Amino acid sequence: ITKIGVFTSGGDSPGMNAAIRAVVRTCAYHNKECIAIHRGYQGMIEGDFEDMNARSVKAIINRGGTILRSARSLEFKTPEGRAKAYNNLKEANIEALVAIGGDGTFTGAMIFSQEYNIPIVGIPGTIDNDIKGTTYTLGYDTALNTVVDAIDKIRDTASSHDRLFFIEVMGRDVGHIALNAGIGAGAEEILIPEENLGLDRLLESLEKSRRSGKTSSIVIVAEGDNIGKNVFELKDYVNEHLPFYDVRVSVLGHMQRGGSPTCFDRVLASRMGVKAVESLLDGKSGYMVGLLQDKMCLTPLDQAIKGHTEIDRELLRVSDIMSV
Ligand code: ATP
């Protein structure tokens, strides 16, 4: 292999730039050429390429988002779209790829690499932490810190006004952000997709915390909570049943995906970038790099995308005990 392409795809996450930097510099270290592909698979189809060298990635380790930009490409889901992408790669002499993204990106990578026999290694970049084969995905730690910081600020205003806040955080299928940020920010209750607390228990818990002398409360709700109501419906429901509470809603939204990556994510990105390039140079293909028991390792892409990582039940208990 003499030339490696790198791209970011799907939802962006903090740390993607640090990973791009690591891929580009590891190529330079091993005297390989590196080509950046802009806008993910769509840029591959359109031949939107750029030659990179060690200096092209200066001053990006601290930046959120992705300098290569990201895109969702419907065309890449068609054989015709993938044929165009392959022809462009071939013309540019790109022989292997590092794909930075989530499970959709890896699904595309698997199909493409099998169809055209092009080596691909993936780096899991998503704030949701919902990919098997790594304890932490890139951007998750930053998102957690962003969410905790936001909840702290909301708590300041909640306690000044004796309010109950429902705060919606990202997590359509998994509750990692909600559970960890909720514990970290001292939330009273945490509603996640993996568990159904039940409306009665929620009311009971809020009443109990009121009786115990709490004047304000924070409830964290993952987007995909399992209680059957979204944050606004929860607000109405609680307003109706516990009229003594002044209930407010805050949806944190896309700010959770932005911001400068934490040191943890920068180090993780650097390790993952090195591992991805060196795995390709070792002749590996169809793997995702990940961190397991603090060691870099490889997991076959099909296993990485097969299932979500499970919630740690111990954390549920800790959260329960903390809201005594
Ligand atoms: P996020 O964490 O934001 O969900 P993701 O990588 O899962 O990130 P997706 O939009 O699901 O984001 O996927 C990114 C891109 O991967 C899609 O726009 C599409 O181009 C490609 N892709 C996804 N699934 C397939 C598929 N079955 N076949 C070919 N390409 C695919």
Image (cartoon, rainbow, N blue to C red):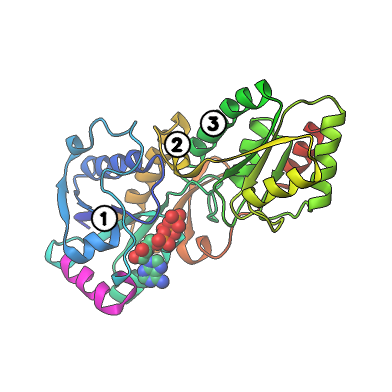
Q: Name the residue under label 2.
A: 265
Q: Quadrant of the C terminus?
A: top right
Is residue 85 inside the magenta stretch? yes
Check disc 1 and give the amino acid type.
Arg
Check disc 2 and give the amino acid type.
Asp
Q: Name the residue under label 3.
A: 150
Is residue 164 inside the magenta stretch? no
Residue at (16% x, 62% y) in the render: 47
**Closer-to-camera residue (204/95):** 204
Q: Name the residue under label 1.
A: 39
* Residue range (magenta): 76-88
Residue at (80% x, 46% y) in the render: 241
Residue at the extreme left? 91
135 on left or right of 78: right
Vertical side of 294 occupied by 110: above or below: below
Question: Residue 162: percent from the left, percent from the top?
Answer: 71, 26
